[in-house]
Amino acid sequence: MSVTFHGNAATLKGKEVNVGDSAPKVELVAGDLSAKSVGGASGKYQIINVVPSLDTGVCATQTRKFNQKAASLPNTEVFVISLDLPFAQGRFCSTEGIDKVVALSDFRAKAFGEAYGVVLADSPLAGLLTRAVFVVDPNGKIVHKEVVSEITNEPNYDAALGAVK
């Protein structure tokens, strides 16, 4: 699969997952450096918000909007995943008042990026995660997927939120 960064093609690597697939369960790093898993059956909806880095305007906006819009959704966990270190994620969330979204880092093994096919293989952002949103139902099935075609654009929030029934 391919996306663009400022209009220039960028290739993704990893195993592509699609709506209807079982969401791979992947271990990430939480703010306290403990392990936290996303994907798989959890008994709740999971909105998995993927960004290249919280230290960019669009990524910050995306995370703030999910924090606001998903706050009232019942039986739903909302995550933001990037390769930022957990310490930087914690500072961002604290400064921005992000309290409904759990920040997780894929910095150790890039296991999430590989399992969901969202690692940028080339472009100036090579090695980072591309912008994407996955919604996983309580039984662990992917019910929504958006890999944003132009990395500098925001995702379709309403489509992601609408997938949580």
Image (cartoon, helix red, strand yellow):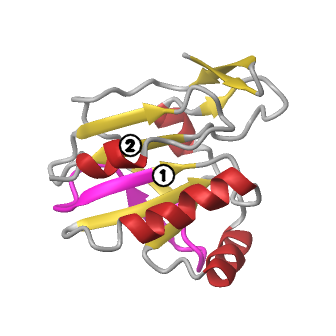
**Rendered view: 50 above or below 28:** above
Q: Nearer the viewer, residue 63 or 43?
A: 63
Residue furthest toward the right?
124
Quadrant in the picture for residue 128: top right
Tag 2 near tag 1, CB within 8 Å: no
Amino acid at pointer 2:
Phe
**Rendered view: 120 above or below 72:** above
| Residue 83 in view (yes/no) | no
Say which residue appears at 62% left-offset and 33% top-offset.
119
Q: Is residue 40 magenta?
A: yes
Say which residue appears at 55% left-offset and 66% top-offset.
64
Q: Where is residue 28 shown, x and y percent of the image?
A: 52, 58
Mark 1 is surrounded, within 10 Å at the Cα level, by few (under 14), some (14 to 19) or many (20 or more) other residues, namely many
Q: Is residue 159 magenta?
A: no
> Which residue carries the number 2 mark?
134
Disc assigned to residue 95: none
**Rendered view: 66 above or below 163:** below
Q: Is residue 112 left or right of residue 71?
A: right
Q: Where is residue 19 shown, x and y percent of the image?
A: 27, 29
Disc assigned to residue 49: 1
Mark 2 is surrounded, within 10 Å at the Cα level, by few (under 14), some (14 to 19) or many (20 or more) other residues, namely many
| Residue 32 in view (yes/no) | yes
Residue at disc 1, secondary structure: strand
Q: Nearer the viewer, residue 27 or 163?
A: 163
